[in-house]
């Protein structure tokens, strides 16, 4: 009998980073005996330069690829997990690979975020990144800046802005990371799921069990906590909110930043560690809920 190899069409956005990530997933799937073909899909998020918070959020990049899953023109989709809504749709399921880097990076030819000149223009549309930087530099002026990592780096080189803030894993994956002018923002809490690649498929997908075997279980626990945290507090899409969970030795560590849209200078920050992820999560949620209430009831 002829043994048919399991064939998978992988849907992805067409950006360099998205294609890199799709290639990464393809290799992992091929190790499992799948044969894969990458199918780039142009999404409406790719057709505009408006900041995400003016567009109704991150769902944009994902929606059209999910439609291709439903239409079965593709079998699986590869996404940056942080672009996926924290409100999960039961028609879909996903697995995650191990996180590589979580950090946000300050990129500038004029030094790090403390050294750079007063009133520097910083290109980032992310309210979360703006709020984090304002904690140390309330003189910064922010400029909306979207587009692929190379486009943003080009705008920096062309002097449109004095600095940009982008994700370390994006830079590393594209071979663009250069520590001569890129600085880790270790105080900044990343977006939930930052640095994590997800493979999405229909809940009743025939190869679901094989895919689940590729999942990194520790990363899964971390991103479930991060996303559950954001879900607790954030009904809208672009909100200044960050969550990072990690295992450090045998302890589970979680740090969050919760910002207020009406005043980005004000944030709640909290971190907690313990052996129990559930304990840490409930403690973090309870702490932030109380602080938010205090803030809302202020005189
Ligand atoms: N915001 C868009 C986005 N979505 C995923 C990445 C990079 C990969 C990742 O961090 O998971 C980026 C670029 C960035 O934030 O600088």
Image (cartoon, rainbow, N blue to C red):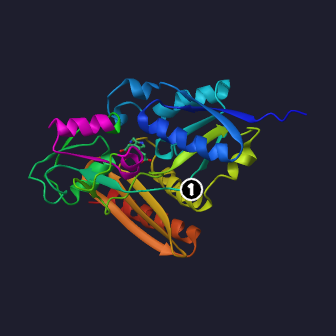
Q: Within 10 angstroms of label 1, few (less than 14), some, or many (20 or more) residues? A: some
**Label 1 sits on residue:** 224
Q: Nearer the viewer, residue 36 or 57?
A: 36
Q: Is residue 195 left or right of residue 168?
A: right
Q: Is residue 49 left or right of residue 74?
A: left
Residue 254 location in percent, x, y?
Answer: 46, 66
**Does residue 224 sit above or below 276 in this rendering?**
above
Residue 181 location in percent, x, y?
Answer: 22, 53
Q: Quadrant of the C terminus?
A: bottom left
| Residue 226 appearing in the image | yes
Q: How many marks?
A: 1
What's the magenta region?
150-175
Q: Is residue 274 left or right of residue 129?
A: right
Q: Quadrant of the N terminus?
A: top right
Query: Which residue in the rendered view is the most extreme toward the right?
Result: 1
Q: Residue at x 73, y 47 (%)?
A: 210
**Does residue 227 sit above or below 53 in this rendering?**
below
């Amino acid at each position: 009998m002829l043994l048919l190899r399991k064939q998978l069409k992988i849907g992805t956005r067409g950006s360099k980073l998205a294609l890199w990530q799709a290639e990464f997933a393809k290799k992992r799937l091929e190790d499992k005996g799948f044969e894969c073909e990458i199918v780039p899909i142009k999404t409406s998020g790719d057709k505009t330069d408006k900041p995400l918070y003016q567009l109704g959020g991150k769902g944009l990049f994902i929606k059209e690829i999910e439609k291709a899953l439903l239409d079965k023109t593709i079998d699986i989709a590869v996404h940056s997990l942080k672009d996926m809504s924290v409100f999960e749709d039961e028609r879909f399921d996903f697995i995650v690979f191990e996180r590589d880097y979580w950090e946000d990076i300050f990129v500038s030819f004029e030094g790090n975020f403390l050294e750079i000149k007063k009133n520097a223009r910083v290109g980032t549309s992310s309210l979360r990144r703006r709020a984090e930087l304002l904690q140390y530099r309330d003189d910064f002026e922010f400029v909306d800046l979207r587009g692929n990592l190379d486009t943003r780096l080009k705008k920096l080189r062309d002097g449109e802005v004095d600095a940009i803030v982008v994700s370390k894993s994006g830079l590393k994956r594209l071979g663009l990371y250069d520590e001569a002018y890129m600085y880790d923002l270790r105080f900044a809490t990343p977006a939930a799921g930052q640095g994590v690649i997800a493979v999405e498929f229909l809940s009743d997908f025939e190869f679901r069990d094989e895919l689940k075997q590729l999942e990194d279980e520790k990363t899964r626990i971390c991103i479930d906590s991060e996303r559950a945290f954001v879900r607790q507090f954030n009904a809208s899409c672009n909100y200044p909110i960050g969550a990072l969970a990690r295992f450090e030795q045998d302890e589970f560590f979680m740090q969050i930043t919760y910002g207020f849209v009406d005043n980005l200078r004000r944030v709640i920050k909290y971190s907690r560690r313990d052996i129990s992820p559930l304990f840490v999560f409930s403690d973090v949620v309870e702490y932030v809920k109380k602080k938010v209430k205090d803030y809302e009831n202020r005189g």
